[in-house]
Image: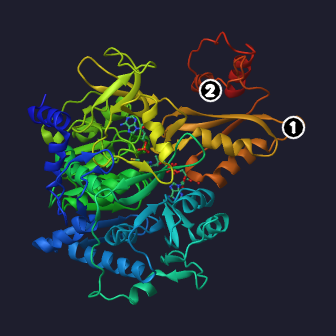
Amino acid sequence: MSDAYTAAWKASIDNPQGFWLNAAKALDWTKAPETGWNAADGWFPGGRINTCHNAVDRHVAAGHGDAAALIYDSPVTGTIATFSYSELLEEVGRVAAMLASLGVGKGDRVVIYMPMIPHTVFAMLACARLGAIHSVVFGGFAPHELAKRIDDATPKVLLTASCGIEGSKVIPYKPMVDEALRLARHGVDHVVLFQREQVTAELAAPRDLDWMELREKTAADAIPACVPVASDDPLYILYTSGTTGTPKGVVRDNGGHATALTWSMTNIYGIGAGDVFWAASDVGWVVGHSYIVYAPLLVGATTVLFEGKPVGTPDPGTFWRTIDRHGVKAFFTAPTAIRAVRKEDPDAKFLGEIGTGQCQAIFLAGERADPDTIGWLEDKSGLPVIDHWWQTELGWPAIASCVALGDLRRKRGSAGFPVPGYDFAILGEDGKPVPQGHSGSVAIRSPLPPGAFRTLWNNKAGYEKNFAGFPGYYETGDAGHFDDEGFLHIMGRTDDIINVAGHRLSTGQMEQIVAQEDGVAECAVIGADDAIKGMIPIGFVVPRAGAENDDTLASRVIAAVRADLGPVAALKTVYTVPQLPKTRSGKILRNLLRKIVNGEQFDTPATIEDPSVPEMLINTVRR
Ligand code: COA
Ligand code: AMP
């Protein structure tokens, strides 16, 4: 056990105010906070800060303007481009000037629906610079989902690009933006679009504006100053799947977020100025927000923005090539990406040939990391592979081995130990801690540390629900246990959220879409195990009377989910069945369905309405 880890964890729990006030000193504040936390104002009440200043300007002011800030590596376009901190400052400043010219100021929302290109990073930081609130929407979501977010966030401006590139597919974005704005009740003042070489989008004046034309009108010497905001003022809204069809708008503050991310970079990942960090995620997810954009820049490190896939762009060696090429010191990806690489290169020939350069550790998160995948990766790379756990709501890791605090303990199947700042409890249904080794709901004693959400946009009640199940605790929605050595094991969700290829989705939301399809009387969508994606959704539909012979029903349902939620939902299998397994009180036995599609043993529940249904379902699934 590492003394440094134990001391840090204890200090953070015994004296959270002192611990985090001390951590906050790593940042530039326009008004330094004197208090750690209070219930009304969150972390660092009275403190004033600008996140963009801390991520960009101050490094230039400190004489590190020539240091590399951002490396854009895009195997799908054959581009590699590096932006120094000075260049990043100019680019961010110009986008800030563009937004300011459109009337965007402190507290205004800006929706960003963009691919993995540097302009997306410029845009996020430009919003932070102005004190505006960005809301990045992942490109794999369909117009309908984008519309929901537009209606909830009510942005002044929407930033987009002419296309995204998904492996070998070029995906035009403008038609999706137009459709979303057609569906949305809220109208934006302007759509600002970055034209990429691969697609030229049509712009409709006066609403639509060309990004580069607007940029031309700004001047390098007239960059808007960073606007100081209260520590608790929102930096961004990031929508994530909840248990209903309505996404939850997680609101991130400025001061707590910058403090927590800075602390995590130093003490979990061991990254500081001069180091190169690469999180192979997408800026549309929390991992992208925290560890592609903000955290590496806050500590003055170099971040890699990778526009590609783990495989096929061009081959399963792309991760190792990128790590080696840029001298990446720590690499972060999702287990599903490693499983995809392994499938195409089981003997790790690419890894063997290319190596991992200066990389010292590989971090995995986003879904449960199966011991076999960790074993393969450790064996083939010779590097420590650190599973760690967190959520959009928290914004940064809560369970990990804090490598940089000298804690390299790990056990395959466990995500590690509570990170300083987090006081975990495993609770039974009665809200009381269960004995060590027993499974229960994974909860975190409140208040949550800096960086964690303090509200949901337009939905304070929804936020409070997370704390209502177990008074005094935040309910993570995950189930797990502590083992006898203190390792925390996360075993799955207690609700209907599933992780598909590291993407968080709600089966409840899919059910809502399926239920609305013509000819569907009843339905269930469950998460089944998948060798590559970890989980995939599987649908069961009972046709309405008269629709029994509709061969197209399953394909219509699949198409509806793709059209409404987006391709990222990855619903590809739907079974048409005469009946669903139900209890006598009418509750659908989703757990039974899950076991049937996974081919697991099960006991038919005594409460089942019709005991012949499981056998019928087994035959349907086997067919
Ligand atoms: N824009 C538009 N479409 C997108 C998209 C985006 N940004 N991202 C994904 N999609 C589409 C894909 O093209 C695919 O469409 P298809 O059904 O027409 O093939 C669908 O959404 C599902 O995509 P994905 O889940 O990425 O599956 P895949 O089979 O294309 O790739 C993996 C599988 C494992 C390689 C890929 O999922 C992956 O790299 N996962 C890692 C994810 C990750 O890093 N998550 C971050 C959490 S830390
Ligand atoms: P997201 O908010 O998209 O980051 O998803 C958070 C959820 O992903 C968690 O509640 C877990 O269910 C799951 N998750 C994330 N990381 C891990 C991990 N290391 N092990 C197991 N589950 C994880």
Q: Quadrant of residue 549?
A: top right
474 or 324: nearer the eye?
Answer: 474
| Residue under numbered circle 1 | 549
**Residue type for callout 2:** Arg
Using the image as rendered, state which of residue 304 and residue 522 is in the foreground.
Answer: 522
Q: Is residue 113 visible?
A: no
Which quarter of the figure has residue 82? bottom left
In this rendering, position of residue 361 left or right of residue 492: left
How many discs appear? Answer: 2
Secondary structure beneath disc 2? helix
Of mark 1 and mark 2, the one earlier in the sequence is 1
Q: Within 10 angstroms of label 2, few (less than 14), some, or many (20 or more) residues?
A: some
Q: Which quadrant of the figure has residue 432?
A: top left
Report whether residue 569 is seen: yes
> Label 1 amino acid?
Asn
* Residue 506 location (% of width, % of height): 56, 41
Colour basis:
rainbow
Place of residue 412 in the rendered image (x, y in percent of width and height, measured from the top left): 30, 28
Q: Nearer the viewer, mark 1 or mark 2?
A: 2
For the view shown, which residue lies furthest in the top direction?
606
Left or right: residue 95 compared with residue 552: left
Does 24 appear above or below 56?
Answer: above
Q: Residue at x 52, y 82 (%)?
A: 209
Quadrant of ligand 2: it is top left
Spot occupied by residue 280 in the image (x, y as percentages of width and height): 35, 53
Circle number at residue 161: none
Look at mark 2 in the image and give the residue it sits on. 590
**Image: 101 above or below 116:** below
Compare residues 466 and 561 and report the one nearer the observer: 466
